[in-house]
Amino acid sequence: MRTAVVGATRDGSALIDVLPVNETVDSDGTAVVEAVRAAVGQAAGGQVGVTGSGAAVLDYSSAVYDNFPYVLLIIAVVTFVLLVRTFRSLLLPLKAVLLNLVSLAAVFGSVVFFWQQGHGSGALFGVEPTGAITFWLPVIIFAFLFGLSMDYEVFILARMREEYDATGSTKAAVIGGLGRTGRLITSAALILFFAFAALASAPGTDIKVLGTALGVGILIDATLVRALLVPTLVSVLGRWNWWLPDWLAKVLRVEPSPLVPKDRDPDATAPARPEPVPTG
């Protein structure tokens, strides 16, 4: 670790500038900040502090990212409870939260691939690989996309729940839910995508990263997740999608949704379609 040190004193105070060779904005470069803090921590007497961009990054990471798992857990639990009351189901809210996290993971992976490693950022925006993502961006991206993705999830699953309550058929719920919400979700996703694409045209690299992350997140969520994974999982889980035990319904003060016996499930007991009779 190579650095240059410049110092000045005045009125009993000392100001020392440490100039590292590498930037102190990523997990590797901030090692110099830790080294400086360890060195000045051994100074006797007086008040010693370390400032600068590297120190700010470390302090922000300590305050935000060290506590982020607890924040994520609280958000997931609160969201799950609210969706259980909305859908009167255990599996639908659990699936909604898990798929939201999968969608977010895909977005963060694409940001690292495109911007941090530079696979396409130069060709599309003329920006060289950033080598790191600005420390405040992941929190902003998470906050935006979690809320927007959950909006789509609630919209489509609420419609599926209404169709199931009316027909008692999971197959009819999937078909009716997608048929009645698909165009609206697609239109809303396209509007947001073009808005974030316009945001990505701003000159600042951080704004470009934010705009592309949100735009890609919307596309992934509205296509792969909401139009493919959600109906597929609902179809596979069948009658278990709509189950809410009595004791939990009483705790949440909603109407229970008992598990339909397999022999009374219209999707399981529906007669097989007859084979076509060959002609000619």
Image (cartoon, rainbow, N blue to C red):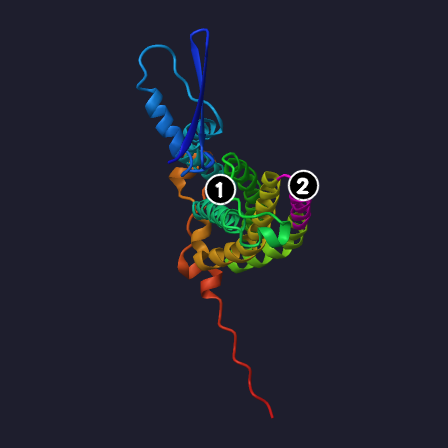
Name the side, left or right, on which 1 lies relative to 176.
left
Instruction: Return the residue nearer the eye: 187 or 23.
Output: 23
Range shown magenta: 190-204
Q: Is residue 41 magenta?
A: no
- The answer to whether one can see residue 209 in this image is yes
The x, y position of residue 9, in whole percent, is: 45, 13
| Disc 1: CA contacts within 10 A as few (<14), some (14-19) or many (>=20) | few
- Furthest toward the top, the residue is 11
In the picture, which quadrant includes the C terminus? bottom right
Residue tagged by mark 2? 202
The picture places residue 279, in percent across and down from the top left corner, at 59, 90
x and y percentages locating residue 16 in the rendered image: 44, 20
Q: Quadrant of the N terminus?
A: top left
Q: Which comes before the other along the chain, label 2 or label 1?
A: 1
Image location of residue 19, percent across then percent down: 46, 29
Q: Nearer the viewer, residue 196 or 262?
A: 196
